[in-house]
């Protein structure tokens, strides 16, 4: 009981300071732009800006001025619903792009592995289906194994917390692949009300 009494004022002070800080931040942000805190809420006109104004490249660099603007290069590619709004898997399937599998040797073909890994999820959320095919069309196995994922059943502790921290799937997703806000693209194996996997019969 004594420990609780000693720590309580510190806790209250911390909460008050945190609340005041959040209130100040929300006031400052909302005064400028109510949607500035969320990059996913950008209007279409603000998406995929040219390199000189994207906040990533050095605008004074001649290279940034030479690079093709994304809107021009993405114009004929199939549209996606998130990220940079290009469906890259569909673009590859339709032959709209032909990425080089080996940086130094254009004659090397990818070793495509058509295998789905299903990770069962507790509760009503659909199970995660990881398709090796779409990943190995772009990447060599060594990109993920064994540094990111140990190729052994039950050996990988994956959580949304770790993904949001940029680990496991988060090494790519949210950076160079579609963002983790697209829940159903991974959680795609539906369950019934009892939590059992739904089966489709023909």
Image: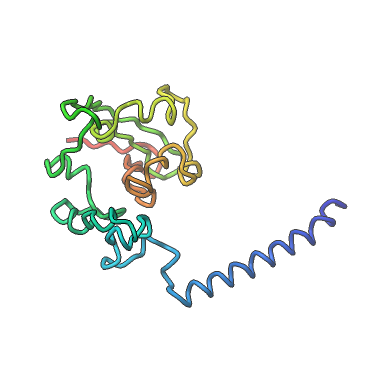
Q: In this view, does 23 lie above or below 175?
A: below
> Left or right of 100: which side holds 132?
right
Residue at 21% x, 55% y: name it. 68
Q: How is the image coloured?
A: rainbow
Q: Position of residue 80 (x, y in %)?
A: 23, 53
> Left or right of 27: which side holds 183?
left
Residue at 48% x, 77% y: name it. 31
Task: Please count the marks in the image.
Answer: 0
Q: Quadrant of residue 99?
A: top left
Residue at 17% x, 51% y: name it. 78
User: In terms of depth relative to the viewer, which is nearer, 69 or 190?
Assistant: 69
Q: Where is residue 159 in the image (x, y as percent from the top left)?
A: 48, 40
Q: Where is residue 181 in the image (x, y as percent from the top left)?
A: 38, 52
User: In terms of depth relative to the viewer, which is nearer, 185 or 167?
Assistant: 167
Residue at 53% x, 75% y: name it. 27
User: In terms of depth relative to the viewer, which is nearer, 23 or 104?
Assistant: 104
Can you name the residue that lies furthest to the top here?
A: 152
């Amino acid at each position: 009981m004594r420990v609780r009494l000693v720590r309580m004022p510190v806790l209250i002070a911390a909460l008050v300071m945190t609340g005041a800080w959040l209130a100040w931040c929300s006031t400052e942000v909302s005064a400028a732009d109510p949607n500035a805190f969320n990059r996913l809420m950008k209007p279409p006109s603000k998406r995929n800006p040219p390199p000189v104004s994207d906040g990533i490249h050095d605008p004074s660099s001649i290279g940034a001025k030479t690079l093709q603007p994304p809107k021009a290069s993405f114009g004929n590619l199939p549209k996606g619903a998130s990220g940079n709004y290009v469906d890259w898997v569909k673009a590859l399937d339709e032959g709209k792009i032909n990425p080089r599998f080996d940086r130094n040797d254009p004659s090397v073909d990818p070793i495509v592995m058509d295998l789905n890994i299903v990770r069962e999820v507790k509760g009503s959320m659909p199970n995660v289906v990881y398709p090796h095919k779409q990943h190995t069309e772009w990447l060599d196995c060594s990109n993920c194994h064994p540094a990111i994922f140990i190729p052994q059943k039950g050996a990988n502790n994956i959580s949304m917390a770790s993904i949001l921290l940029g680990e496991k799937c988060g090494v790519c997703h949210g950076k160079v692949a579609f963002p983790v806000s697209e829940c159903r693209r991974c959680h795609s194996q539906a369950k019934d009300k009892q939590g059992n996997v739904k089966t489709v019969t023909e």
